[in-house]
Amino acid sequence: MNIISIGYIGFETSKIEQWRSYGPEVMGFQIAPSPSQDPDSLYFKMDDRRNRITLHPGKIDRLTYIGWEVRNRMDFIAAIEKFKQHNVDITIGDQELCERRGVKELIRFKDPVGYQHELFYAQKWTPRSFVPGRAHGGFICDERGAGHVVLMIPQESPELTDFLRNVMEFEWYGWGAGKGKTGFWRSKLNDKTSHDIAYGVAPGRMGVQHMGIFVEEVRDVGETYDLVRKKDLPLMMTLGQHTQDPHMSFYHFNPSGFAFETITELEPWHGDPFELNPEIMSVWGHEIVGPIIGPSVGAPEEVYPEQFGQ
């Protein structure tokens, strides 16, 4: 499957008014016009695409969908055939949904643990249309898309591994260096970083743990860090550099209770000719000063009651 990256991502939130100020003032996102079919949701731009992150009003703070981008219509058709060959239930997005997402066509499907995914091609864009919500050097999207996401699952799932490898055709990168068990995967066409998506085991719980976002300059990381501290927003980890990649980042919690990792590259990605097994998570910094798993992760029946509730 010729998947490029996460093209867009959607969340439900009970705190949409907090996001309306937090998104541009802290993260530097641009508030985009909401489509007429979805006027109550909050759409954020990170580049010249119509939107990258969407917040939908609701009662539960949770991930609602991940939108994976393929290169073109031919790859989209081939992906549909792949899903059918593996007996994966898919739903074809109607015209209204495609317009809300700003894409030519899309399909919807769930992974074996229950997270909602979408696959699309040709998202709307307007050259030189991105204007950051505050002074900001810009986000790295393009082939990277919106960034990476780390999800928690209640228990290990061989079915999930098979799905990611043999249906989605993701590349296995390796395990994270933390104390938990988190597997890193990246899309077939992404050779710029270690992972697009990761699944970590949190016994009896599920939900989004963090989302990683790449910025252009070290200054963008530092200024975001200063704003987070000035506004007394809760930190997960201080500034630091992971052992597995040449990235500097820090983690803080957003209004929905999951973390944003704000990342910049200190040097170009080094590739990965073999699987690494680092003994420490970071070569400097990244002091853990808050919970690793925030309130966005809970019992499946609490986070997704319509799916797992009695």
Image (cartoon, helix red, strand yellow):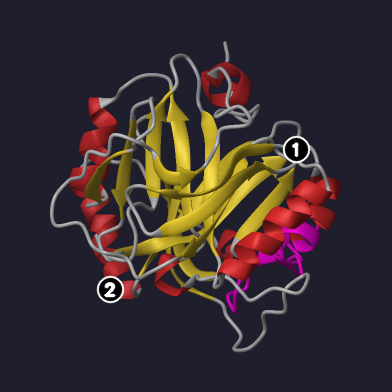
The numbered dot on residue 12 is: none
Distance from the alpha carbon under mark 2 to that under mark 1: 36 Å
Crowding around mark 1 (Cα neighbors within 10 Å: few <14, some 14 to 19, many 20+) is: some
Toward which corner of the image does residue 177 lie, by quadrant?
Answer: top left
Location of the C terminus by quadrant is: top right
On the image, numbered disc 1 is attached to which residue?
Answer: 58
- 73 or 28: nearer the viewer: 28
Which residue in the structure is indicated by mark 2? 74
Instruction: Describe the element under mark 2 as helix, strand or loop.
Output: helix
Res 150 seen here? yes
The N terminus lies in quadrant = bottom left
Report if residue 44 lies within the magenta region: yes
Quadrant housing residue 216: bottom right
Give the percent coordinates (x, y) of residue 223.
70, 63
Q: Residue at x 71, y 48 (%)?
A: 56
- Seen at 34% across and 70% down, the residue is 268
Q: How crowded is mark 2: few (under 14 residues within 10 Å), some or many (20 or more)?
A: few
Left or right for 187, reference 29: left
Residue 40 falls left or right of residue 285: right
State which tag comes first along the sequence, 2 or 1: 1
